[in-house]
Amino acid sequence: MAALDPVLTLCDLESWSRPGTALAVLGHPIQHSISPPMHNAALAALARADARFADWKYFRFEIHPDDLPRALDLLHAKKFRGVNLTVPHKIIAFDRVAEVDAAARPAGAVNTLRWSERGWHGFNTDGYGLASALREVFRRELSGAHVLLLGAGGAARGAAVECLERRCASLWIANRTRENLDGLLAALAGLAGAIPLRGFAPSAPPPGLPGGLLVINATSAGLRDTDPPPIDLAALPGPAAVFDMIYNPPQTPLLRAAAALRIPPANGLGMLVHQGAKALEIWSGVPAAQTAPTMAAAARAALGVA
Ligand code: NDP
């Protein structure tokens, strides 16, 4: 199903003249994204009950980071109603929006933009998507959990803010590049308050890590089957569950390692669905809970999973 959605480019945007209400996802790469079939299934279902949605359609664009400013200007000029941003645009776009939703500000990253006269209004629905997925797949809340977050990019930022705002018991962040890790820790310090917040290199888990960690992978390591897991789970003191934000492929080296150690694993499909339903709520006003089941069914069909 996803293969039927063409991958559009900046050139397509330059000459855009399609009538109707347009939504888009921008990424580099974007080939793997199943957001178009997911959103278009939800829009088709909405259109059956409400003619307002009859001309709404969601497209995907392959946009290099160097072209992001131009693409955002064009999308605004062509009056796209909303935009989703995926790898690697979430942090770059943060400084290019006219207004940032208060809840997205501490994250320093936006994944959802809504058109306004003044320019783009930025939101971050990743944290909401993560919390909803953890509840659904593990019956777990971030509140009171000891969390080990892998990564310091756009998705990790949204996740870290959600962990702290929901008052996790402690937040440990491991990232390959120290400079990016330090930037994230500095951005989070004010929000953490009394919650223990520590960073470390994935190759050197520190003493003092608590048992029963909720491990969340927010790195891109695992998008390719040849990627090594972003951390050695066996070096951690008894993780309780492993959530990998990656959903395509549905099995990653990290999730395979978790299963081998009998740690409950889950991929990022549920998060994708819930962050997408929240984005559609921002654009349409339709509650996320109403569109999430249709999106989930479409996402599973697009991936060919039961
Ligand atoms: P970014 O490009 O902003 O960040 C990438 C992160 O991954 C950085 O921390 C980077 O570390 C790290 N990284 C990249 N390659 C490797 C590697 N080979 N080994 C270890 N670490 C690596 O991307 P996003 O934060 O936007 O997305 C991250 C992942 O989360 C992607 O796989 C994306 O598909 C997934 N995602 C899923 C969502 C869902 O709804 N399920 C929603 C959002 C994201 P460094 O700082 O060292 O470069």
Image (spheres, rainbow, N blue to C red):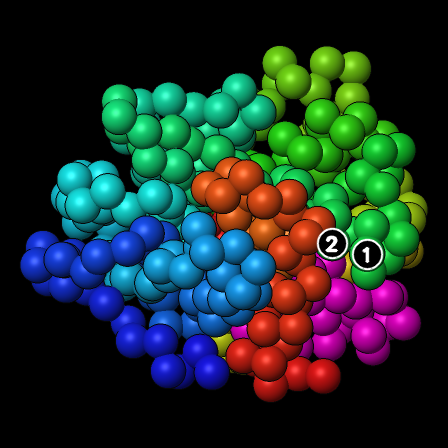
Disc 1 marks a residue whose amino acid type is: Glu
Instruction: List the residue tagged with mark 2.
Output: 133
Name above or below for residue 138 compared with residue 247: above
Instruction: List the residue tagged with mark 1.
Output: 136
| Residue 295, quarter of picture | bottom right
Residue 162 visible in the shown view: yes
Q: Nearer the viewer, residue 153 or 11?
A: 11
Q: Are marks 1 and 2 in contact (CB under 8 Å)?
A: yes
303 horizontally vs 123: left or right: right
Going 70% across and 20% down the picture, which residue do you hit? Answer: 192
User: Element at badge 1?
Assistant: helix
Residue 256 position, x and y percent, is 73, 76
Instruction: Residue 244: say if magenta.
Output: yes
* Range drawn in magenta: 243-270
Q: Nearer the viewer, residue 126 or 197?
A: 126
Going 88% across and 33% down the picture, which residue do you hit? Answer: 144
| Residue 287, quarter of picture | top right
Going 34% across and 43% down the picture, which residue do you hit? Answer: 81
Q: Is disc 2's CB within 8 Å of ligand 1?
A: yes
Residue 44 position, x and y percent, is 50, 66
Instruction: Residue 196: say if magenta.
Output: no
Going 24% across and 42% down the picture, which residue do you hit? Answer: 79
Label 2: how many Cα within 10 Å (few below 14, some 14–19, many 20+): many
Label 1: how many Cα within 10 Å (few below 14, some 14–19, many 20+): few
Disc 2 marks a residue whose amino acid type is: Ala
Q: CA distance from mark 1 to mark 2?
A: 5 Å
Residue 233 position, x and y percent, is 77, 61
